Structure formats: C-alpha cells, structure tokens
Image (tube, coloured by chain):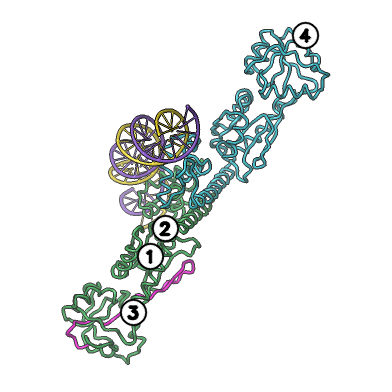
Chain colours: A cyan, B green, C purple, D yellow
DNA sequence: CATCATCATAGATAATGTTTAATGAAAAGT
DNA sequence: ACTTTTCATTAAACATTATCTATGATGATG
C-alpha cells in the first residue's frame, strides 16, 4: 500500500538509479521518471541531482528520503498491528534464493506453506548468494535463503539445517545397502561431481580436507555442470557421487538411486537472511517459524 | 499528498459518516465507499461497523485510525521541513470566514498576500462563526477568521484588530467634517442599522450600553438586512449609521460617504483560529504573519 | 407502514499511471 | 576526435484506477 510517488522515489533514492529502481519495481523507467517528477513538482524542488551521469540526492531529497523511511516504517507497523489483531495471514512475500535451494528445497517447503496459508502470495527470485544478500540489504526481497555463511552485521541471519549431503549410487551398487558409508570406502569408485567453484563441490572438498586423508583424494572421473546431470550420470551407472539429499527425492521414490548417509554426517546449513528491523511482515515471521518446524521434521533421517 | 485511501478513511473515521466525508473531500459518496473498501480489502477486514444506521470504527479500524494520524503527522512534518529548507512558499490553504469578513476584509488581504506569494492557492469557505470553528476543529479548513470571541481550548486563537466601526454619513452632513464624533452627537439624527441579531448590531448595542446613556438610545429609523443596503440608505441621505470601516472603502474613495471615527474608538477584533498542532503548513504561518503586519499598517487611522 | 437518511452497487466517464518509441546528453571505449 | 554505450527525459498511445450518475437496499423515525 502507501503512496506510490514516495515509494518510487524511495527506491530510486536507495539504489541511486532510475533504471535499477524501475527493474526492482517491475515497471519501465519512464514511469519512474514520471513519479519522481510528480514528487518534485509537489515539493517544488529537485530531489535528485542529475548533473553527472550518476544521480545524487539533493539536500531536500535526502530529507524526503529520511522521512519516507519513517513513514514506511509506520505503514509497516500499522499493517502488522492490524493483521496481528485480526489474525490475518495474507500478503505478498518476496523471497530470493540461490539456484540449488530455489530448485530443490523451496518448492516443497513453499508448497506446504501455501497450502496452509492460501492467501499468501510468494514471489521467488533466483540469483547467486551474493546477489541474494545484497537484494535483502536493499529491501528488494523480504527474505533470502542461501547456502554459504553470511557475514553482514546489518542483517539478521538464521541458520537452519535442512540439507544433508549423502552418497548416491544405483540400487545394485556395492554400497547401496550400507547403513552409512565412510569416505575411504568411496575412494575406490569412480566419482562424479560438480565443477570446481560450485557450492556443493566446495563443501565436499573441505569435508575431505577436514578428515585429513593422507594424500589420497576422491577418484574423480567426471565433472558436471548441474545437479541434474550428476544424477543422470550416477543413474546411468557411471559412478557414485555425493549430493544434497533434497535434490534426489524423486529418484529415491522411483528407486533409480539409493542414498547412503556419510559417516560422519555431512550437513550443510542454510541461512535465512533478512533485515533486522523491528517490524517485519507478519507473513514472514510465519514463514520463518514454518521453516524451523519443517527443518526439525525433515531432519534426522 | 499522501495515500488517498488512508486519507479518505481517516476523514470518514473522524466524521463517522461516509456522506459527510464525501462532502468534506469534495467527492461523491460512492467514491468514498470505494476507497474505504479498497482499504478494507487490503487489510482483509472490516474497518467500519455498518450494522446500525450509524457507522462505528471496528477495533481494527480504530487502530488504523490511530496509525493514520501518526502517518499524516509525519507527512506534514516532511512537507514543512522540505519547504522550510528550500524557502518555498506554495501550496493550498483552505480558509473559512464569516460573511462580513469574507466579503469585506479578506479580499484585500488575500489579494495582497497572493500578489506576494503567487504560488499559493487559497480556497475560501463562507459560513457563520460556529460553522467556521467546527470546520477548523475537524480539519476541514486550515484557518478560520471570525468576529466573535472563540472559546475552545483545543484550538489556537489569535486576535487581530483589523476592524474599526465608524459613523458614516453623506459628505454634506453636519457631522461630515468632524474629526471624531461622540455618541450623544449622533442621537438626534435618524439612524439606520442592521437587524437585531447581526454581529454589527450586537457590537453597537453593547457600545451604547457600555457608555451608559441615561435612558436615551439611538434614534433608529430603519433596520436593514445587509451592509450593502445600509450603505445605500445612508448614501441616499436617509440618515447616518455605524458600520465596519472595511465595508466602505469603495464609497470613501468615490466620495459618496464620509467616515467619522467614534469617540471613544469602537474596535472589533477578529479572531484567527487554527489547530494547535506543532506542525502546521508553512504557508499558514506565512499568512498569519502577513495578517499581523497588515493589521498594524491598516490600524491607526 | 411510509418516509427519510445513509451506505452499497453497477455502468459510464474522467483522471492517473504506464508503456512504447524516439531524443538528448554525458561517459567510456576506440 | 569519434563512435558506442548508458541513462534519463519527452511525447503519444494505452491501461488502470478513481470518480460520478443513477439506482437499490436497509435501518431509523414518525
């Protein structure tokens, strides 16, 4: 809700760009110009300095920016306050997540959430971890879910163990009926994995390093560019792999793959990041709580 | 500026009536219904209880009302703050005044004001004193100018001596070249005046009473319903009268009437009334100051 | 039970906001 | 110095939203 002109202005002021503000607000950039000018006409003064290629807030603009911040905070507080009173869980929640999470973890979680709270509309943006964090910072998204640890003291970070990495193989493979498998048992088999630089590969690398094998590493026979292709290769019997359990739910149900927990267990916590302002959207608190419970339930397996 | 829905809602909540809110906001009542419903849809709850013929705020509505108050205050503060910074005097000012003031005093004052600050738009509403005061109270107008004293501790009242009552006659009348005239000198002439109940008549009555004549009153030969008709009668040589100096500027310039100050002087202060909130429109402060100066200048004559 | 006052609804119209396409102006690359 | 690129503005067509007119429904009042 709230005043369109102020909202558009606020976004431009935050991003210091008409173009980026337009993208963020899902509108074209002339429309942004229009709204900002409305506001400038109203105040009878320029709010942005456009003399250089980069725009800057004028003194008046800065003041409007500060006030609009406070005004939006109040709007937000009002919104929460009313919805809390009426017990209403509805609204729009904009979430961002890194690729793997967005593709394998969130659909199930958000699906469940949505079936519980049907009046919530969820918008999901996909980007890499850094992108997600900066989107949270600039209020483009309400909530970010990323793999890597986040170090940003301006934001609230909450870890959630939803992901476990497991060894996978075809059902007829030697390790298929083990209850768990130690790393050295895997060394002899051809190993398929993601390319250097991927989040999953990083985790596996440091797992191997932590266990401190005396020189011997994994027998990497193939490096593939996506979780899907890795699964495909393993299903085709080309080797084994270590992969996020969340990504292979369908294959487990179909019986085309078998998952064997590692010993010691290899977990990768997810981080939920969001602004640490006092008044968040009620829907978001609800989703966070929902996610916590979800983690507990889907955890120890 | 600010959010239309909230603004409309706020007005309805204040007046507890869709119809009255519509009048106040210069719109039709269905439009008010529309905006309120937008807000109710947004919050997913009713804000007004319409079960009885009189509407009432629901609990949620009351909360929104409180918040909107704070939000508008911020908007207002932002507005003033920015305009103060840029030295901008512009905007819309809605003034209300009682008939005589609106017809004879304000046109000159507002004309001068407007020629100094051409970007100010002034809306003038005319009503009786009580009506004006209650309009100020419910924020329908920003500033009220009335004759009678105002006793309302919720409002700020500022007196301003702009009006002087003088004796008027044709230029060939006996009293025409007096520097001043005492009441007893007037008693012998046919006296024309406003009807019982009018503000001017009240003032004259109490003036006569205060001077405590021993029984003799004015020799009232005619009671007329408007300042214009009183002037006309005096111009036609039918008698003398006592009238607000502001109402006879044109006649003085034309020479069709002569004004003689009373001894003692008979003054009628005007009262400016407005809300006493901290943040008023900058334009209004400017107008008040302008009026003060104006009073000083047009005073001692 | 009829009448008045008040809010709701529907369809037409007016006002605002948005997009597409073209233009201008400043910075970066050649 | 000259193109290319990036970013904001302008203008006109188009879309959305708000408002008005006319009318209906409901509760209060005499």
Mark 1 or mark 3: which comes first in sequence? 1
Question: What is the residue that sits farthest to the right in this orientation?
Answer: A214
The residue pinned by badge 1 equals: B132
Seen in the image, is A235 located left or right of residue B32?
Answer: right
Q: For this rendering, which residue is in front, C26 or B190?
A: C26
- Local secondary structure at mark 3: helix
The residue pinned by badge 4 equals: A174
- Local secondary structure at mark 4: helix
Residue B155 is covered by the magenta coloring: yes
- Marks 1 and 4, how far apart at CA: 93 Å
- Marks 1 and 3, how far apart at CA: 20 Å
Chain holding disc 4: A
Chain holding disc 2: B
Q: Is any atom of residue B51 visible in this view?
A: no
Span colored in magenta: B149-175
Q: Residue at x 39, y 65 (%)?
A: B287
């Amino acid at each position: 809700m709230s005043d369109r002109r102020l909202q558009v202005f606020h976004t431009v002021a935050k991003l210091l760009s008409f173009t980026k503000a337009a993208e963020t607000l899902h509108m074209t950039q002339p429309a942004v110009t229009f709204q900002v000018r409305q506001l400038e006409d109203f105040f009878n003064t320029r709010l942005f300095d456009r003399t250089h290629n980069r725009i800057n807030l004028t003194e008046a603009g800065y003041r409007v920016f500060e006030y609009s911040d406070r005004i939006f905070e109040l709007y937000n507080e009002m919104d929460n306050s009313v919805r809390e009173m009426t017990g209403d869980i509805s609204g729009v929640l904009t979430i961002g997540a890194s690729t793997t999470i967005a593709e394998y973890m969130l659909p199930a979680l958000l699906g469940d959430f949505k079936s519980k709270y049907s009046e919530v509309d969820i918008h999901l943006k996909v980007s890499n971890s850094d992108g997600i964090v900066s989107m949270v910072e600039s209020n483009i998204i309400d909530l970010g879910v990323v793999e890597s640890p986040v170090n940003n003291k301006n934001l609230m970070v909450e870890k959630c163990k939803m992901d476990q990495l497991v060894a996978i193989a075809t059902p007829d493979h030697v390790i298929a009926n083990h209850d768990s498998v130690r790393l050295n048992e895997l060394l002899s088999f051809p190993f398929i994995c993601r390319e250097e630089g991927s989040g999953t590969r990083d985790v596996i690398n440091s797992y191997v390093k932590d266990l401190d094998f005396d020189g011997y590493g994994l027998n990497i026979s193939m490096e593939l560019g996506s979780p899907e292709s890795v699964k495909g290769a393993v299903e085709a019997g080309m080797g084994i792999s270590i992969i996020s359990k969340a990504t292979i739910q369908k294959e487990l149900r179909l019986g085309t793959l078998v998952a064997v927990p590692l010993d010691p267990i290899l977990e990768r916590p997810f981080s939920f990041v969001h602004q640490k302002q006092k008044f968040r959207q009620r829907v978001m608190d609800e989703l966070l709580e929902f996610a916590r419970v979800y983690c507990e339930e889907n955890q120890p397996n």
